[in-house]
Amino acid sequence: MTEKPLKLLFMSTPVAPLGSGFGGGVELTLLNITKALQDRSHEVEVVAPLGSELDSISIVEIPGEWQPIAQNQGRNLPIILPENSVLANIWEYGRSVQHQYDAIVNFAYDWLPFYLTPFFQTPIAHWVSMGSLTSALDRVICEVMNRYPGTVGFYTHTQAATFNCEGSYACLGSGLQMSRYQFCPQPEDKLAWMGRISPEKGLEDAVEAAQKTGISLEIFGKIQDENYWQNILESYPDAPINYIGFLDTDRLQERLRHCRGLLMTHRWVEAFGNVAIEALACGVPVIAYRRGGPAEIVCNGETGWLVEPDSVEGLVEAIANLDQIDRENCRQQAEMEYSLEALGDRVEWWLLQIRDG
Ligand code: UDP
C-alpha cells in the first residue's frame, strides 16, 4: 500500500447495465479491479447504467439509452450517440464530480470518453476492452496514447498491436477472486463453451467439434444475436449440445469445473478472454484458436492446446489430447498470474503513475 490511498471514479460500459452479461468480460474485469483496489484501501466509486448490479458494491446509477455495440458493424462505422445517451449522461456526471477524485477510469469502448480527455481537469485512465474495430475509435485512442503516454491500458500486447499506434501503453491482463473458483481434479466426459453468443465468438466451430467427437458441449452465456444462435441450431440439429443459459459466477464455476476442457473458437482478435482464466482457475484446460489474447494466456501443452485458427480438425485433435494436460497446472497458472493480488499490483502501479503525473 502507498501512504495516500487513491480516490477513483470508475465509469462503466454503457452498452447495458452491469450484471446483464451484455457487457461481456469487462463486467467481470470492472468488478475484480474494484475488489483488488478496495482490498488495498483505495476508494472506488462505480458509475453505471440504471439497473446495474455489481456484487455488494454500491453503484451510482445513471439513466439513458444504451450505447449500440460496435462488434460486427464494419470499420467505417461512424460515431453514434443515441438521444439521451447513457454514455453522455455518465460522463456529464463525471464532469460534475471530477474534483473529488485523483483519477477517472474509463471502461467504455467508445469515442466520447477519449475525445473528452483533454477537457477534463482530473486525469483519465482508459481501460480498452476490445481490439481495433472501427477507424474512428482507433484514431482517437491513438491521439490519447500519444498525448497522455501510459494512460491507456490494454489486456494483452496482441490486443494493443491491433491499434497500430506507436504511443506507450500499459499491459494489464486480468484477474479473479480465486477463492470463488473451486478446483475439480476429476472431470465428467463433457466440454464447455462460454461467452456472448455472437458471430465474432465462432460458437459454430465448437458445436461442430462436439458433433465430430460425440462429446457433449455445455454452452454458457448470453444470446446476444438470436438469428446467429437459431442458425447454429438449424445447421447442427444432431450435435450433442446443451444450452445452460447465462449463469452468475458462482453457478457458472460449479458447472464449468466438471468439464474436461473449455473450447475458445473466436473469429476476431480476442482482447483477452476472461473465460480462459476462469476455466484455468477451476483446473479446466483451455483449447483455443491461436489468435489474440488466449495465445498469450494458454501455455501450449501445459495448460491447454493452441490450435490453428478456424481449424475444426485442430480442435478435434486437441480434444483427443486433453488427458495429457495436468489439471493441477491449470489451477497453478491461474493462481500465479491471475489472482486478485497480481491484478492489483499491475493496476495500482498503472493508476499511481497516472495520479502522480
Ligand atoms: N459469463 C458469465 N456467465 C455465463 C457465461 C459467461 O458470467 O454464463 C461471463 C464470463 O465470466 C466472462 C464473460 O462472460 O467474464 C465473457 O468475457 P470474455 O472476456 O471471455 O469475452 P468478451 O465478452 O469480453 O468478448
Image (cartoon, rainbow, N blue to C red):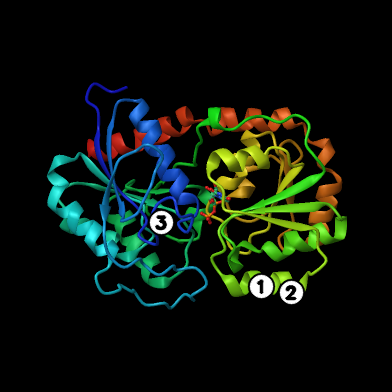
At horizontal 29% and vertical 60% (from top left) the residue drawn is 114
Whole-angstrom CA distance, mark 3 to mark 1, is: 42 Å
The residues bearing labels 1 and 2 have C-alpha atoms spaced at a distance of 6 Å
Residue ID at (47%, 31%) = 340
SS at mark 1 in the image:
helix
Percent coordinates x, y for residue 287 in the rendering: 72, 48
Whether residues under marks 3 and 2 lie with C-beta atoms below 8 angstroms apart, the answer is no
Please say whether residue 277 is visible from this viewpoint: no
Q: Position of residue 102 (x, y in %)?
A: 20, 39
Cβ at disc 1 under 8 Å from ligand 1: no
Place of residue 73 in the rendered image (x, y in percent of width and height, measured from the top left): 48, 75
Q: Which mark is residue 171?
A: none
Three-letter amino acid code of the residue under disc 1: Gln
In what element is the residue under mark 3? loop
Mark 2, other Cα within 10 Å: few <14 / some 14–19 / many ≥20: few
The answer to whether 330 is drawn above or below residue 132 in the figure is above
| Mark 1 vs 2: CB contact within 8 A | yes
The kind of secondary structure element at disc 2 is helix
Residue at 18% x, 40% y is: 101
Total tally of numbered discs in the picture? 3
Q: Which residue is mark 1?
A: 230
State whether residue 33 appears in this view. Answer: yes
Residue 249, by quadrant, is top right
